[in-house]
Image (cartoon, coloured by chain):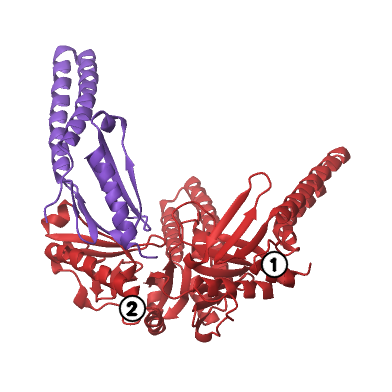
């Protein structure tokens, strides 16, 4: 009963996004601070953006670490969330379809997100940060399991 | 071709059109509206040349409307092949709809006023699905045809021979019309009106004491706007009540071997059939103003796509087990569709006392219960609602907790069903209990599914 975790590349991808936004924020806050209040203002802006970057880095790390999924005999368990923790159980027999998506940054790191859909709109089971090959494999496995255990509405 | 034989042919697999009077019903409403608009335009103060132009515009619009309805009737064909309902429609965008009858969730027969005058009715086949596909609509057939088509579609849905006659239904429950009217008038919106009146009265009472003439004048203005607001509110309330009375008048439930039969409606008649085993969830609601009278509303849900865009339509579409009933009747009804599940929960299923800090208002109503077939949860404060879910229909189970809940060592448990997004929520449970329950419910749901096959 060991939860499997997303690929460590997901953490790299998240850090990339975080780094880029932090640099942008740094530039904006630094320049605007310097223009408004001169040298100390610029330093203050840089300090503030650095503090923000460190906090978001810590939060992102916690979030990344919180992801986990577990394939059991009859269902899939997904857990996530740092402050608001969520755990979702989806029986294989209830899966309507599985889709795999990958955004631009994800593709850069060869990552993909697997999402499960049931007949209930509220079901929220997705597993991000899987290597594309793993994601495709998981998708096929889930589809097979779902087909074998499918039960009518 | 007489309609009677055309229906028999369609059921035997030959493409057929709908009833020839269908376009009349289709355009009846729009044409009426156009005529009213036209008359008001024409009778308005216009120069004679403007009047002819207006008349022309109305005439052209009317002709276009009639032509569209007739063409739509001409290009629509339907038939039943094997256990599939097929509908082809559309002139410019051809649409070929196929409804596997094995997957039918419910079959409704709806007769709006115009259709009733002409002795016609619409058959609506409701199937599950997450896409934006439409329901199968056969609008319109003659009354006998509609009944025959419904019987055959249901027989096929149950995997029986198409010729199986419709099993007889014996009446189960009938809603008292007087109570329905009273209950429709007892809406929470009244409280809002009362608040507005109270605020206005206070303002008016305070104002004269203030003294000055100009201020008094301001008070009078406020009073007039207040009165108009109240009147608007009352009219809206009245219309709302009239709509729900019209929709649910003469509400009766019958029990047949192929499912529950619901009949309701004053001007527009609806006959709904819900096959057994298609019920995804049952909900019992006790609105605030009904509680002194001990009334409740019982709804049930089948797997249907969320198609209703506005509230009024959504209420029309929700399958009701009883628009209003006494608590005893409601409990009895729930026992009929969910034998073994309690309709109201005892305090034994309440979350731990410390949950009060998280939900001080609704703590009183929070409760959860389950056995190996049903899960029952109770939530809400102003409108306490009990949701009853058959475990074999569970789609997914979610456990969540925020910082406050975690500090109290509590967690929320939500059970999703395939319906109109009713979620059975067991809120503020002990965290250890909830974690154990997630796995236990998962196993129980799996076992229940296995048994139901």
Rendering coords of residue B377 (x, y %): 28, 70
Instruction: State whether residue B361 appears in this view.
Output: no
Could you tell me which chain the residue with mark 2 belongs to? B
Residue at 30% x, 71% y: name it: B450
Of residues B261 and B356, the one drawn nearer to the viewer in this rendering: B261
CA–CA distance in space, label 2 to label 1? 38 Å
Indicate the quadrant where residue B161 lies: bottom right
Of residues B440 and B434, the one drawn nearer to the viewer in this rendering: B440
SS class, disc 1: helix
Vertical comparison of B383 with A137: above or below: below
The quadrant of the picture occupied by the C terminus of chain B is bottom left
SS class, disc 2: loop
Query: In the rendered view, does B395 fall on the left or right side of B277?
Result: left
- Mark 2 or mark 1: which is in front? 1
The quadrant of the picture occupied by the N terminus of chain B is bottom right
Could you tell me which chain the residue with mark 1 belongs to? B
Letter of the chain shown red in the rendering: B
Instruction: State whether residue B379 appears in this view.
Output: yes
Q: Which residue is mark 1?
A: B115
Q: Which mark is residue B343?
A: 2
Residue at 55% x, 56% y: name it: B228
Rendering coords of residue B133 (x, y %): 52, 53
Rendering coords of residue B10 (x, y %): 67, 66
Residue at 44% x, 58% y: name it: B196
Verify CB contact (< 8 Å) between mark 2 and mark 1: no
Letter of the chain shown purple in the rendering: A
Of residues A8 and B29, the one drawn nearer to the viewer in this rendering: A8
Discs 2 and 1 share one subunit: yes
């Amino acid at each position: 009963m060991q939860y499997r975790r997303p690929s460590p590349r997901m953490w790299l991808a998240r850090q990339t996004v975080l780094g880029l936004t932090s640099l942008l924020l740094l530039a904006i806050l630094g320049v605007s601070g310097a223009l408004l209040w001169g040298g100390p203002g610029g330093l203050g802006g840089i300090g503030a953006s650095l503090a923000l970057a460190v906090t978001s880095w810590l939060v992102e790390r916690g979030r990344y670490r919180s992801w986990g999924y577990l394939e059991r005999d009859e269902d899939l368990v997904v857990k996530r969330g740092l402050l608001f923790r969520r755990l979702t159980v989806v029986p294989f027999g209830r899966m309507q379809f599985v889709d795999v998506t990958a955004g631009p940054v994800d593709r850069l790191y060869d990552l993909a997100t697997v999402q499960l859909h049931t007949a209930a709109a509220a079901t929220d089971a997705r597993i991000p940060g899987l290597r594309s090959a793993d994601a495709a494999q998981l998708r096929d496995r889930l589809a097979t399991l779902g087909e074998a255990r499918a039960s009518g509405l | 071709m007489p309609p009677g034989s055309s229906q028999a042919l369609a059921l035997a697999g030959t493409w057929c059109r709908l009833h020839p009077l269908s376009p009349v019903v289709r355009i009846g409403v729009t044409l009426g509206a156009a005529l009213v608009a036209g008359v008001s335009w024409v009778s308005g103060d216009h120069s004679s040349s403007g009047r002819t132009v207006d008349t022309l515009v109305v005439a052209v619009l009317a002709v276009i409307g009639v032509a569209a309805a007739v063409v739509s009737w001409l290009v629509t064909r339907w038939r039943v092949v094997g256990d599939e309902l097929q509908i082809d429609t559309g002139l410019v965008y051809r649409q070929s709809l196929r409804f596997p009858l094995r997957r039918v969730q419910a079959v409704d027969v709806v007769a709006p006023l115009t259709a009733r005058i002409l002795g016609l009715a619409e058959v609506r086949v409701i199937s599950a699905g997450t896409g934006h596909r439409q329901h199968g609509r056969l609008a319109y057939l003659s009354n006998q045809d509609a009944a025959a088509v419904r019987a055959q579609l249901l027989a096929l849905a149950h995997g029986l021979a198409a010729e199986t006659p419709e099993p007889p239904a014996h009446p189960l429950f009938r809603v008292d019309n007087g109570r329905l009217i009273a209950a429709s008038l007892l809406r929470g919106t009244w409280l809002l009106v009362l608040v507005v009146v109270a605020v206005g009265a206070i303002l008016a009472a305070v104002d004269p004491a203030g003294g000055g003439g100009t201020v008094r004048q301001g008070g009078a203005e406020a009073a007039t706007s207040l009165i108009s607001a109240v009147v608007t509110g009352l009219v809206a309330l009245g219309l709302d009540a009239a709509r729900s009375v019209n929709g649910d008048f003469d509400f009766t439930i019958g029990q047949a071997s192929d499912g529950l039969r619901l009949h309701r409606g004053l001007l527009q008649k609806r006959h709904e059939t819900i096959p057994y085993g298609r019920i995804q969830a049952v909900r019992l609601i006790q609105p605030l103003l009904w509680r002194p009278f001990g009334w409740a509303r019982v709804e049930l849900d089948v797997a249907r796509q969320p198609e209703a865009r506005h509230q009024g339509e959504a209420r029309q579409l929700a399958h009701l087990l009883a628009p209003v009933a006494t608590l005893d009747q409601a409990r009895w009804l729930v026992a009929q569709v969910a034998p073994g599940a309690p309709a109201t929960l005892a305090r034994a299923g309440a979350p731990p006392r410390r949950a009060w800090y998280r939900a001080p208002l609704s703590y009183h109503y929070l409760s959860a219960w389950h056995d190996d077939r049903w899960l029952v949860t109770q939530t809400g404060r102003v409108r306490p609602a009990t949701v009853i879910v058959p475990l074999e229909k569970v789609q997914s189970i979610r456990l969540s907790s925020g910082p406050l809940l975690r500090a109290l060592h509590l967690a929320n448990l939500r059970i999703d069903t395939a319906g109109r997004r009713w979620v059975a929520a067991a809120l503020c449970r002990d965290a250890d209990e909830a974690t154990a329950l997630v796995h236990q419910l998962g196993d129980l749901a799996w076992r229940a599914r296995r048994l139901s096959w």
